[in-house]
Image (spheres, coloured by chain):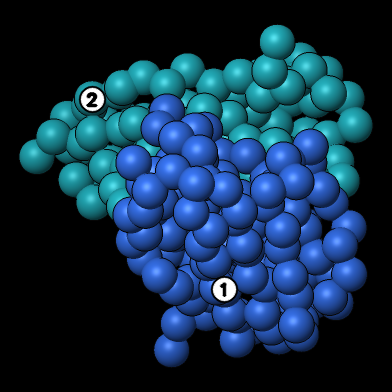
Chain colours: A cyan, B blue
Amino acid sequence: QKEVEQDPGPLSVPEGAIVSLNCTYSNSAFQYFMWYRQYSRKGPELLMYTYSSGNKEDGRFTAQVDKSSKYISLFIRDSQPSDSATYLCAMNDYKLSFGAGTTVTVRA
Amino acid sequence: DTAVSQTPKYLVTQMGNDKSIKCEQNLGHDTMYWYKQDSKKFLKIMFSYNNKELIINETVPNRFSPKSPDKAHLNLHINSLELGDSAVYFCASSHSPETQYFGPGTRLLVL
């Protein structure tokens, strides 16, 4: 069983919809929880990171962490075609462990 | 100004050859990493260096040898390339583990 589980999708939504992404994990030692965005044929770029359980907002993006359930989520409000990418969750103890990534397409 | 750069961007080679990938960062970070992303987009850490010292080696075959001549550079040399080595290799750097900056990747195809 992988330490970090993420549904690879793909996920297709109309422009303006809310995109909901999530990951589960098994390692209680994970301290930081990150979301990366990866456009096709590019390197991952950090979107957000959070340390504690709860919500963190950054513009149209909201990250949620529930450590008791070992569950993290990313919500994208008012999605745009430019949000079409693969979204990777990541968590760290002494190293980063990534989910498989969810491919999202926002249709204009 | 590119923060983390890698060369080459593409590498096509025959089985059994030896090849190197170079990485440079101009962010002033102390820690650099090599990751491998397979065809299913799964990203996995291979090595991590902090200030030229190896701190993470994730059960990577001995054919892979990282070298850090200074804290701004981390190179990856691969001996006796195998078909299974075909992947995208990403270099990254950070000042703290939760904020890593990735390079554009090197696409390696072994024939």
Image quadrant containing the N terminus of chain A:
top right
Q: Chain of mark 1?
A: B
Residue that appears at 67% across and 24% down: A4
The quarter holding residue B97 reads bottom right
Indicate the amino acid at tag 1: Cys
Q: Residue furthest top?
A: A1
In the image, what residue occupies the spot 60% across and 80% down? B25
Is residue A98 depicted above or below A34 in this figure? above
**Camera-nearest residue between A26 and B10:** B10
Disc 2 residue type? Ser
Q: Is residue A11 left or right of residue A69?
A: left
Q: In terms of secondary structure, where does tag 1 sit?
A: strand
Relative placement, left or right, of B86 versus A41 is: right
Locate residue B30, reporting x and y percent.
80, 76
Is residue B22 or residue A92 the one in the foreground?
Answer: B22
Q: Quadrant of residue A68?
A: top right
Instruction: Find residue A31 and report its horizontal and vertical position in percent.
Output: 84, 40
2 and 1 marks on the same chain: no
Instruction: Point out the residue furthest to the front here.
Output: B16
Callout 2: residue from which chain? A
Q: Which residue is mark 1?
A: B23
Label of residue A12 in the image: 2
